[in-house]
Amino acid sequence: MAKLAKKIKKSDPAPDGYSKIEPTLKKLQARMKEAQTSSGVSDKTKSKTQSLWIIYQLNHQISRYVYDMYYKKKLISRELYDWLLLQSYVNSELIAKWKKQGYEKLCCVHCILVSDKNHKNPCICRVPKAKLLENNESEDKIKNLQCVTCGCRGCASTD
Ligand SMILES: [Zn+2]
Ligand SMILES: [Zn+2]
């Protein structure tokens, strides 16, 4: 009979293999901390929205790193992956979306929330570039496109 893996808890010590990915994770977390601290401070070169973009982007980057290490590079164990998903610095909601067809490159979960006060439809960054061209949007506009929520420049799977 196959041995059932024991269910991992958030409070469990880091499973084997963690030391391999720890330096990168720590580096990204430090940048996140810095971004969170500086988003409270007024910076004349950046708007409030733009400092929030960095936080969204780092959140994406940390989750992407964990996702790639498990699904793409297969360098970490299921146990370690499960444990990482339980940690608060990983966005498991976003990772769950990446597994769905059409959402492989999704920037952040807010951009597909249609009830969001920012937009009644999924965000502009979710619309494939080809579709924008079809709708006669100017190439310039398409090139400079950036969503208001997280600063994404396009995350449709076909782009
Ligand atoms: Zn996006
Ligand atoms: Zn987004």
Image (cartoon, grey):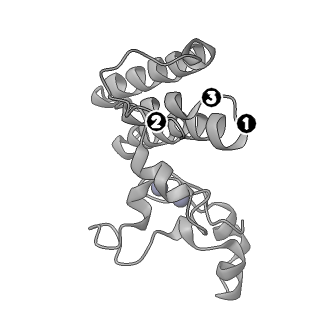
Q: Residue furthest bottom?
A: 135
Q: Earlier in the sequence, mark 3 or mark 2?
A: 3
Which x, y percent locates residue 112?
42, 66
Q: What SS does tag 3 mark?
A: loop
What element does badge 2 sit on?
A: helix
Task: Specify whether 118 is left or right of 27.
Answer: left
Distance from the alpha carbon under mark 3 to that under mark 1: 8 Å
Picture coordinates of residue 73, whole percent (x, y): 73, 36
- Residue 76, labelled with which disc? 3
Q: Point out the residue furthest to the front here.
A: 1
Q: Nearer the viewer, residue 87 or 109?
A: 87
Q: CA distance from mark 2 to mark 1?
A: 16 Å
Tell whether 136 sits left or right of 15: right
Q: x%, y% of residue 59?
A: 46, 38
Are the two marked residues, 3 and 1, in contact with CB atoms closer than 8 angstroms? no
Residue pictured at 60% horizontal, 34% vertical: 65
Give amino acid for label 2.
Asp
Q: Disc 2 designates what residue?
A: 82
